[in-house]
Amino acid sequence: MTAPLVEFRDVHFAYSDRAILDGVSFSAPRGSVTALMGASGGGKTTVLRLIGGQERAQRGEVLFDGQDIGRLGQAELFAARRRMGMLFQFGALFTDMSVFENVAFPLREHTALPEALVRDIVLMKLEAVGLRNARALMPSEVSGGMARRVALARAIALDPELVMYDEPFAGLDPISLGTAARLIRRLNDALGLTSIVVSHDLDETFRIADHVVILANGKVAAQGTPQQVRESIDPLVHQFVNALADGPVRFHHPGPSVEEDFGQGGGA
Amino acid sequence: MSWWRPADVGFAVRGKLADLGVGARLFVQLLRLAPACLRRFGLVRDQVHFLGNYSLAIIAVSGLFVGFVLGLQMYYTLQQFGSADILGQVVTLVLVRELGPVVAALLFAGRAGTSLTAEIGLMKAGEQLAAMEMMAVDPVKRVLAPRFWGGVITMPLLAAVFSAVGIIGAYIVGVLLLGVDAGTFWGRMQSGVDVFSDLGNGVVKSIVFGIAVTFVALLEGFAARATPEGVARATTRTVVVASLAVLGLDFLLTAMMFSS
């Protein structure tokens, strides 16, 4: 079996004094869709930022195709980033450019292709996400779901090996959500990508993922196929995959008990 | 409880020093990106077009009114000494040496500077700058540097427009309405204004103000907190900091240029 495209080895990361990742190890096999799940604020987006080199791990290794991202200089990091695409939560389209120009942006910045070829590539990428005829629209004129599809076309413009999705389903209606999920799977298989999807949407994510990693309290709580994770006996994972309100993650904000607050405790 | 502790002072000073360092590094980076901007001059040209058009109307209208007022005020004062002939010369010197660069820079800070700060701040808030970084494109090089050099080029052009329109305003009031002789108005202006020591120094001033205002606007936008409140605060700070910088620099430059 070939080496995984992305591998975390005992990664520790903290924002000033707030620990986010505390010894995280997992790998994303080549050609697979890896889902990264967990409670909000659990460090999922941080994992993507570490892979993209926007943050550096304080301890441990973040390997992308065998290179430790945290040790790369600016030029090497930029070279590595050209092999990655990233889809931000709300698309992060350039608001002063049309849909066409947004997708053409990485091509214009990194290649010296003639205009006719740029046009063909952009239209092919837009065709892949079903928005070839939306090329002339501005980002303010497209819906949230469409904006994310445009951003996806932009992310794959340079034919990356890895595509990272930061909550691609957040705030989408059921139709757009299903479309987005199928698109992630289809592009992954058709283009031979490796995908990492950060998501809260259990059903859609479990449907398209080959491999699921659940993060909790800065550690990997469970990983494996969707089926294996569903059957996990870890109480935290059980609470998460069954969407239970109470469990190891409490429903009530910590503090005095109900009895104490309503004067029914021992002291009253 | 005492209202300050030595540790707080140290923390605040270190924070300010770090901010200064960030600013200085960005400034050096922008200067070093000049050749890169020349190679892709289209990006700078777009910014000159955008920033210039943004401020042109307000600069021209303000210049006209300032010219009117200067014409009136100077005429009444000079007339007391029987020197209304030199109206053209006096108005022109005031405009090209001082008011042109300074007032144009203040208006530029209010009009184009704020829009630059808000634009960069919103690009940051919308993760556009992060997206650019993830595409292996340096936002300082692609977004900030063309805007910086665009602003530096635009500022002297706007100051020139301001001064020219101001002179026309003074001509309208002084010559057409108050009866100063047109030949004297232009003749005294021509003989009394030096290309290098007056016009040249005015141009140098406006270039320095262009650097200051555009840099402050970009730095505030780039360092803004990526929230609606953070962008609003940064925009306000741009006007305050850039205006003070212009007035402070104007004093320094005037002292250096015209004191000998």
Image (cartoon, rainbow, N blue to C red):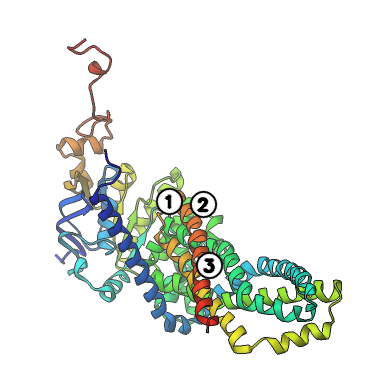
Between A61 and A160, the one lying in front of the other is A61
The residue indicated by pointer 1 is B227
The residue indicated by pointer 3 is B247
Q: Residues within 10 Å of mark 3 (few under 14, many from 20)?
A: some
Pair 1/3: label in front: 3
Pair 2/1: label in front: 1
Look at 70% across and 68% down and name the residue there: B66
Type of amino acid under label 3: Leu
- Residue A139, percent from left and from top: 52, 58
Between A226 and A53, the one lying in front of the other is A53
Specify whether disc 1 shares its chain with disc 3.
yes
The span from disc 1 to disc 3 (Cα, nearest Å) is 30 Å
Q: Is residue A74 visible?
A: yes
The span from disc 3 to disc 2 (Cα, nearest Å) is 46 Å
Type of amino acid under label 2: Ser
The residue indicated by pointer 2 is A143
Q: Is residue B45 visible?
A: no
Between A208 and A58, the one lying in front of the other is A58
> Earlier along the polypeptide chain: callout 1 or callout 3?
1
- Residue A98, percent from left and from top: 54, 65
Q: Image quadrant for the N terminus of chain B?
A: top left
Look at 79% across and 81% down and name the residue there: B85
| Label 3: which secondary element | helix
Between B56 and B7, the one lying in front of the other is B7
- Residue A7, percent from left and from top: 18, 61
Disc sitting over residue B16 in the figure: none
Indicate the chain on which mark 1 is placed: B
Q: Residues within 10 Å of mark 1 (few under 14, many from 20)?
A: some
A132 sits left or right of B90 in the view: left
Type of amino acid under label 1: Thr
